[in-house]
Amino acid sequence: MLLRKIKEQAPLIHHITNQVVINFVANGTLAVGGSPVMSHHAEEVEEMVSHAQALVINIGTLDPDLVEAAALAGKKANQLNIPVVLDPVGVGATAFRRRAVTRLMDEVSFAVICGNRAELSFLAKGNWEGKGVDAGSSPAPVDWPFEAVMALTGETDYVNHVAITGGHPLLARVTGTGCLATSLIGLFLAVEQDAQKAAVHALSMLKLAGEMAGAKASGPGSFVPALLDALYHITPEQLEKRVASLL
């Protein structure tokens, strides 16, 4: 069971992520059983990632220094066969973001690329239909031209063409849940070489945690701590039951 492996091994997950969600995704990683490190300076990321079992790159609060650090860490991770996951936040919104993601995808091999419909559709087709970093509920892109596994988050999540339903509306009412999905994918990649299997487990776990938290929360303010508690309390058996019909 993958969740049991995480709890037994406490894998180190190196995050180069955005400043809006850094505390939230670190706590989410800890709640599940991983060990997050949030190192983003170019002078140390190659050394830091060499200690990690997975690397998460999130371009939410993008600047040139982050791009440089992400490229260095990603290439080092590839050399060491450490899985890398990319969250191309708002990739189609500005030319700067497009250039940054183009560089990263040219220089780094990603196991999984995780984003919403607007972001992944832009990568696949070149047309941007986002509102901020959010998007509608259209089906997953059918023509995904990359080797990386596609993990599309939304009301229904998709891992390639595996649909993952469930969750709770409050997942869309607090910032950072998509970023947390990417972090959880990195966490499961640390213990599972099959990237599709890892991503299905990660997104299924977040959907289940959202349901558990939504049953207790009265609104967004109480939902976040309830979500962290739910991630902590989900058992390996509960998660395996959830994914049994998907794999």
Image: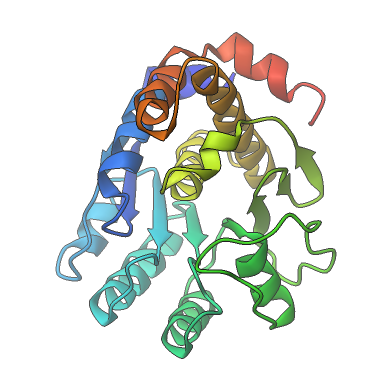
**Which corner quadrant of the image does residue 117 belong to?**
bottom right
Going by the picture, which residue comes out furthest to the left?
43
Q: Position of residue 119 (x, y in %)?
A: 60, 68
Indicate the quadrant containing the C terminus: top left, top right, bottom left or bottom right. Answer: top right
Q: Residue at x 43, y 81 (%)?
A: 100
Name the one closer to the observer, 73 or 144.
144
Q: Residue at x 62, y 12 (%)?
A: 238
Name the one closer to the observer, 84 or 231.
231
As drawn, 208 above or below 192: above
Q: Position of residue 30 (x, y in %)?
A: 32, 29
Going by the picture, which residue comes out furthest to the front?
218
Q: Residue at x 73, y 54 (%)?
A: 137
Which colour style is shown?
A: rainbow
Side of 8 where 152 appears, left or right: right
Side of 94 where 225 appears, left or right: left
Q: Position of residue 45 (x, y in %)?
A: 23, 62
Q: How many marks?
A: 0
Q: Position of residue 224 (x, y in %)?
A: 38, 31
**Which corner quadrant of the image does residue 69 belong to?**
bottom left
Indicate the quadrant containing the N terminus: top left, top right, bottom left or bottom right. Answer: top right
Q: Residue at x 21, y 55 (%)?
A: 39
As drawn, 247 above or below 130: above
As drawn, 55 above or below 201: below
